[in-house]
Image (cartoon, grey):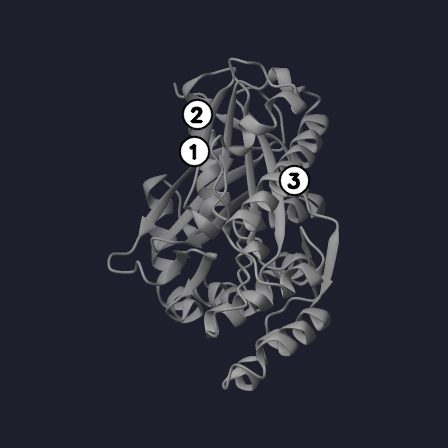
């Protein structure tokens, strides 16, 4: 019989610099308005994005100067490693474990490139064993919090009794570009924040919930919806299609198909825990998943307080759902480059 996997702990971390949306909007106007003819029409996104504040790895003045790959990468290594350490220590403390107990580390990050990857760079600082297995994953984007959790669960299941650490670290603010006069860049500026989340998983009994399974659905001919352009300045965001309308039309059927493959039905789900990609995306998900308007309240709260942090965001939402009292069965959902929908089903530990 296949052993069940328990989510033992979940913790989140954010950097110290708090950027108010009003300040970001004012800075963006100062930087773009005189050079971008369509700016006034697009600038309303700062009011409609649903973001009140977000946290970033650098103060707002840092982003007002041109930055290239070397500077962005240096910040990614330093600040990304610090967030990895912060979230991991919180998760280990919550589970009553130490870094030496960890057998496998799954690291998800798509907002910087590091070789050796982040978990190797903090291995000594955190005290991981020298024989710990490392699984760095790049390219999952906003879906990474869900897909990464599913990968970590399967690895825990494959080695019963082992302890798997899953960490999602994203520094989305490093993708801000002074040289791109595009709608996608303005929208990203209004939405993106930085953060990290860490989970501990094992076949041990107890914990917060058991993981019932998960899956993905990738739509063909959708490579242009979301991703990065890579050039000498760094990453440039791609939002080439209307993601909210796509989610409203397609997400419900995709989620139902994923759940069917793990012997579940949408009616079995007490709460969907969704990636907070933006207010329009959240509303589109309520429509597509046949949820009551306003039911994704924690998603809107995370978006308001932290912005869209890509992969860790859905885990910030799950953290709030846990604090409020986890329903019997929840399903995590997110969409990311590919274009892909990802789901993971959890059942509350009795």
- Asked if labels 3 and 1 touch by Cβ distance under 8 angstroms, the answer is no
Q: How many numbered marks appear?
A: 3
Q: CA distance from mark 1 to mark 2?
A: 6 Å
* Crowdedness near tag 2: few (<14), some (14–19) or many (≥20) residues, C-alpha within 10 Å: many
Q: Nearest to the eye among marks 2 and 3: give it.
A: 3
Q: Position of residue 96 (x, y in %)?
A: 71, 22
Q: Is residue 282 visible?
A: yes
Residue beneath label 2, please?
Answer: 155
Looking at the rendered structure, which numbered label has been put on residue 212?
none
**Helix, strand or loop status at disc 3:** helix
* Crowdedness near tag 1: few (<14), some (14–19) or many (≥20) residues, C-alpha within 10 Å: some
Q: Horizontally, is 191 left or right of 11 in the view?
A: left
Q: Residue at x 57, y 85 (%)?
A: 40
Residue beneath label 3, please?
Answer: 83
162 relative to 146, above or below: above
Between residues 240 and 31, which one lies in front from this camera angle?
31
**Quadrant for the C terminus in the image:** top right
144 relative to 300, above or below: above
Q: Residue at x 41, y 20 (%)?
A: 158
Q: CA distance from mark 1 to mark 3?
A: 21 Å
Precedes in sequence: disc 1 or disc 3: 3
């Amino acid at each position: 019989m296949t052993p069940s996997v328990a989510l033992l702990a979940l913790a989140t971390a954010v950097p110290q610099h708090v950027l108010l949306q009003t300040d970001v909007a004012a800075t963006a106007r100062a930087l773009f308005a005189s050079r971008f003819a369509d700016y006034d029409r697009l600038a309303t996104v700062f009011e409609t994005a649903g973001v009140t504040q977000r946290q970033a790895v650098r103060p707002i003045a840092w982003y007002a100067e041109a930055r290239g790959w070397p500077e962005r990468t240096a910040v990614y290594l330093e600040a990304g490693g610090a967030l990895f350490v912060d979230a991991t220590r919180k998760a280990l403390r919550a589970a009553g474990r130490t870094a030496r107990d960890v057998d496998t580390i799954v690291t998800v990050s798509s907002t910087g490139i590091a070789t050796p990857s982040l978990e190797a760079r903090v291995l000594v600082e955190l005290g991981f064993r020298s024989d710990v297995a490392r699984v760095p994953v790049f390219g999952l984007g906003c879906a990474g919090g869900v897909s990464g959790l599913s990968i970590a669960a399967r690895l825990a299941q494959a080695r019963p009794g082992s302890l798997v650490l899953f960490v999602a670290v994203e520094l989305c603010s490093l993708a801000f570009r002074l040289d791109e006069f595009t709608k996608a860049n303005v929208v990203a500026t209004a939405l993106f924040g930085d953060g990290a989340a860490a989970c501990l998983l094992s076949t041990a009994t107890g914990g917060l919930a058991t993981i019932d399974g998960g899956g993905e659905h990738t739509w063909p001919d959708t490579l242009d919806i979301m991703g990065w352009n890579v050039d000498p300045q760094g990453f440039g965001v791609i939002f080439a299609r209307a993601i909210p309308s796509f989610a409203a039309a397609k997400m419900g059927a995709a989620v139902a198909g994923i759940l069917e493959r793990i012997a579940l039905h949408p009616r079995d789900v007490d709460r969907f825990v969704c990636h907070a990609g933006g207010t329009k995306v959240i509303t589109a998900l309520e429509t597509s998943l046949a949820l009551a308007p306003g039911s994704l309240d924690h998603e809107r709260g995370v978006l308001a307080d932290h912005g869209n942090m890509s992969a860790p965001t859905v885990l910030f939402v799950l953290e709030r759902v846990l604090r409020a009292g986890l329903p019997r069965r929840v399903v995590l959902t997110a969409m990311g480059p590919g274009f892909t929908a990802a789901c993971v089903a959890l059942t509350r530990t009795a």
